[in-house]
Structures are given as structure tokens and as C-alpha cells.
Image (tube, helix red, strand yellow):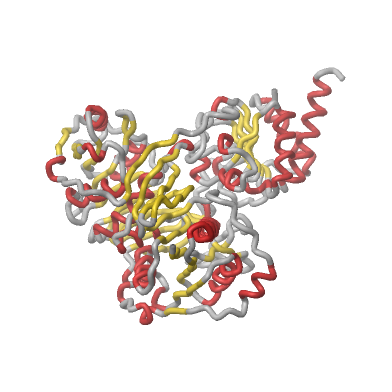
Amino acid sequence: MEILVCAKRVPDSSQNEIEPNASGNDINRDDLVYSINEADNYAVEEALQMVARNGGEVTVVTVGGDDDEEILRRELAMGANHAALISDEAITGSDGKGIATVLKAYVRKNHFDLILTGTQADDGAAQIGGMLAAMLDYPFASLVNSIRVVNPKTLEIIREIEGGDKEVNEIELPCVLSVQTGINEPRYVGMRGIRQAASLELPTFTLSDLGVDQSAVGEAAAKVKRDDYFSPESGKGAEILQGSRGEVVEKLIELLKAKGGLK
Amino acid sequence: MTPGIFALISHKNGVADDGAAELASASKKIDPGASPVVIVTGFGPELDTVCTGLGKLFGEIWKIAKPELAYPNAELVRNALLQVLPKSSILLVPHNHFGIDLSPGLSIKLNAAYVPDVVNIEDLRENSLALVRQEFGGQLSRHVSCDVSSGAVLNVRPGAFLPGEAAPLNGHVVDKSSEVTVRPAKRRFVKTMVADAGGVDISKEPILVSIGRGIQEPDNVALAQALADAMGAVLSCSRPVVDAKWLEKSRQVGTSGKTVKPRVYLACGISGSFQHLAGIKGNPFLVAINKNPKAPIFQAADVGIVDDLLQFLPELTSRIRKTSAMAAGR
């Protein structure tokens, strides 16, 4: 089974305080820690486990710039067979549809039985997988947390619905699935592996390599434009307890007692 | 001319999703004079009960009744919508497990703009709709402008729009079933698996100590368990802790976990994504402990503590133990 995983490099929001820059048109990118989007890493692990059981190869693709090569190298070190970078100035400012258009062209140039993405990335949009599937006329399922091969043409997938319930579906190949975090336990990638992958030549494709018209992507084609960042309205906001740690502990205990938080 | 506004509502056991009133209210933010049409798909007497209920909120209800739509399969619902939606419509859908499944692909097939997880709607000028979304797990908001000239699909965050206070309507049902042909799907629903009821039932606990990614290591879970024991509380958690297999799924609070209604909720190292907050009901006394002062949890919390969890928790535990020992007269 030939599997493609679409991945994205993102600022790790669990390790960074994300703030708007001075003009508000971007985040402040000084000193940010970047990594592969967490759900995408689970998708790569799932793909690796599937080819280990069923044969085939895993390709990881990202749309971005030179800086984004680091996640491709990381996923190669993790065990992916191939990686590809799609990079073109004209892609800047694309909306979700623009990115899906580029990925569709890459898929059409190759042969994949299954395409995986993470459920969502830093922008919380959860849109690329479903868009890509519709463009390719492949079936799609989101929030997938289990994949089983039934036969060479069919998968059984389990997806999360509300309240911890799950939904079992059968889906025909080729298809696109967006994978939830927690579907597996992604393997550890050691520094040695990453160093070995550092010197690998990564195939890079431009829009013309993929036969994508520049007018189909970028800011001009985008129906959805992302404008300024701002801090969320703080609502009522929490009362922040001030003082030394000991003082804060004392204040909190009094509050907990008053609110019935101590039995 | 303002485009037609539609809302798609899912339902279960004859009851429409809570999002119905929120979508009615969201459509008024696009156009205060809007008369949105609600679309429901399904089959049988349950569907008619849903239509009747929705008549209070919407002036017009489009019913698509087909045996194949008895369970909401996004692929089949998409095809049905493509057959009935007028050109250049604006369609509102709740941003839940069904909307995430349906809307991105639907927007492609409609050649319409798509904006996921909309938290606010500011205004519509000419064909440009000004919206607000959030990024980075709710740490930042962002203005988004959406060209609706060829229609739009907007997935609306559950809970973001307060239901309006308009007088109840007396909506009429339009049966659109005959306009829809159902074709075989490449994705087929097999069955639903109900969450495992085993283990602890956090949904009934009055005091919860809840841990998130900030707990960092599986070994540190014991720090939170010790605090819970000292408080007489039960341990719960957010999604990353379950993803990492540090606690069992039955302890997860949020849309993909349990809904809880405690008196006191102590969120330790939880950033506060909307999926997590949506699982906390009943307006508990919410305390957030997080080292990141920008964490969205501080907007939802009553009291916040900006500190290192791994230092703070043991000190709190030890102080509570001393307090209760004194109270016991020892």
C-alpha cells in the first residue's frame, strides 16, 4: 500500500507563548520552537505501522519553504521512505483551498492508495484533508482513531464522535483520512537518525513542476483572507493570585474551603 | 442583495442539536433582517419531531427524508445538499464531528468559500464577510475576511453565539425529499460504539483535579493524584494526557470525552481549548494553574495561578494535609 502523509511545520504552542507582532499581521516569530504538527506525526506513525503490516511505502509531503525541510528530515529519520517539499513564492497567501489545490496536483503526479493528514494544525482549521478528498473525488473521513485493512480495496475505520462515542465506517480506497492524536504511540526519533537524514537530498517541486497555474493559488485566488491577529477578549478573566508561592497556596486554600472544594 | 442564508442541523432521538438556536442567532449577525432556512436530513417519525421543534427558531424548514439518511453520513448529506442548495448560498454548520467531516469537501463541490470554527461574525459589506477565528489553541484571535460572492460554508463554533431572544416563530416545513436522489456512497456507516462505561464516573464528581499537557511526564501524575486525595477530589484530564496513555479515556473531559458538572474544577497545566471547556458545565468554581500567562484557560477561570505546576502542586498538597490534620485536632 502506497501511503502519502501531508504534514505541516508549526510553532509548538505547548512550548511557546504566541503573541501578535507589532503590526498584528503575523505572530512574533523570534525564539519560537517549531516542530511537526502533532497530529501529522501521529499520521506518519500510523502510515509506518500500516506498511509494516501490509507492505508498501510511506511518502511525507509538505507545502512551505526551506525551513520546513526539517520536519521532512525528521519523518525520514522516523522511517518514512520518501519526502517531498512543494515550494513556490506564488503559494504565499493561499487559503485552505489553495493548499489543497497544490497537494491535489502532487497526488495526481504520483500513485497513492491512501492519503493521511493530521486532524488539525496550528490554525485549528481541520480543512485540508476534506478539501483534497473532494478535489480528487475520493471518499473522506475525519477524526479517525483506528484504521484496519479489510481487503485491498476497503478499510474499516473508527472515528470519534461526541461524548467519547465512536463510529465505525467502511471506506473504499483510494481515500483521504484525517487522523486524531492518540491513534498510536509515535516512535522516538533519536538525534543520530536526524543527523543521518540531514544530508539527504529532498526532492523539491515548484508549481510549474506540478502543472499548477499560478492564478489558482496564492493571495489573489484566496476567497478567505487572514487579516490581523489580536488577543482574545478576556471575558471576565481570572483573578490572578499574587504573592509568594506560600501566600498563593494559603489564598487558594481559603477560596477552596469557601467554594466547597475541600472535603 | 444579501444571499440566502441556510443552517444545517443534526439531530439525535428526535431532538435537534443545541446548535440550532446558535445558528439562528449567527445568521442574524450576518444580516439582521435574514430569514434563515434550516435544513434537516434523516428519516421516519423522528425527523418530523425534529422539524416541529425547529419551527420555533426558523421560519422555514427544509426536510430531506430518505431511508439512506437515517444515520448522518457526510458523503450522502453532501450529495443531498448539492441537489437542493441555491447557488451562492451561505450555509452555517456547527463545527462539530459532523461539520468537520462534511464542510471542507462540500465547499469545494459548491465552489464556495469555507471558514472553519468561526467564533464571531462582525459584518457583511458588499460581498466581504468579516469574521473572527482563533488560532494556536485559542491563544490568539484573528480577523478573517471571506468573499461570499460565490457562496460560503461557515462552520460555527458550538457555544460561541448566544441564542437570541426573538419571539418563537411558527415555521413551515417544506418537503424537499423528492428533489434528492441518493447515490451509493464510497464510505458506509457500520455501527456506533458507545463509550466504555467502565472505570471512574467523573461526570458525577463534585470536585475534580484535572491535569493537562503541563504535567509533562507520566511520573508526575502522582503529584496530581496526591493533591486529589488530600482534597477529597477525583482526578480527570484533558485530551493530551489520554493521547499519551497516562490516564484512561474515561477520565477525559471535553467534546471527545465526558461532560462534567462539578462544584469545583482545578485545571492544572491545561491550556483550555474550546473542545475541553465545552465539557465543563454547570459554571463551577474554576481554578487554573498554568505557567503560560497567555493560556486561554485564564479567560474561562475564576481564579488563576501563574506558576510551575510541578513545584506548586506538592506545596498545595502538603499545606492542605496540614490544614486538615489541624482541623482534626491532631
Quick check: B17 left or right of A253?
left
Q: Position of residue A90 (x, y in %)?
A: 39, 77
Considering only vertical position in the picture, is B129 above or below A22? above
Q: Quadrant of residue B42?
A: top left
Q: Residue furthest left?
A: B178
Residue positioned 28% across, 58% down in the render: B125
Query: Would residue A227 be visible to someone looking at this image?
Result: yes
- The answer to which of A233 and B27 lies nearer the viewer is B27
Residue positioned 26% across, 34% down in the render: B57
Residue positioned 74% across, 34% down in the render: B226
Q: Position of residue B307 (x, y in %)?
A: 71, 47
Residue positioned 44% across, 65% down in the render: A2
Q: Quadrant of the C terminus of chain A?
A: top right
Q: Position of residue A156 (x, y in %)?
A: 41, 48
Quick check: A181 left or right of B146?
right
Q: Quadrant of residue A73?
A: bottom right
Q: Residue furthest top?
A: B329
Considering only vertical position in the picture, is B259 above or below A190? above
**How many numbered dots are placed on residues in this image?**
0
Q: Position of residue A55 (x, y in %)?
A: 49, 62
Q: Residue furthest right?
A: B330
Q: Quadrant of the N terminus of chain A?
A: bottom left
Q: Quadrant of residue A200?
A: bottom right
Query: Would residue B40 be visible to someone looking at this image?
Result: no
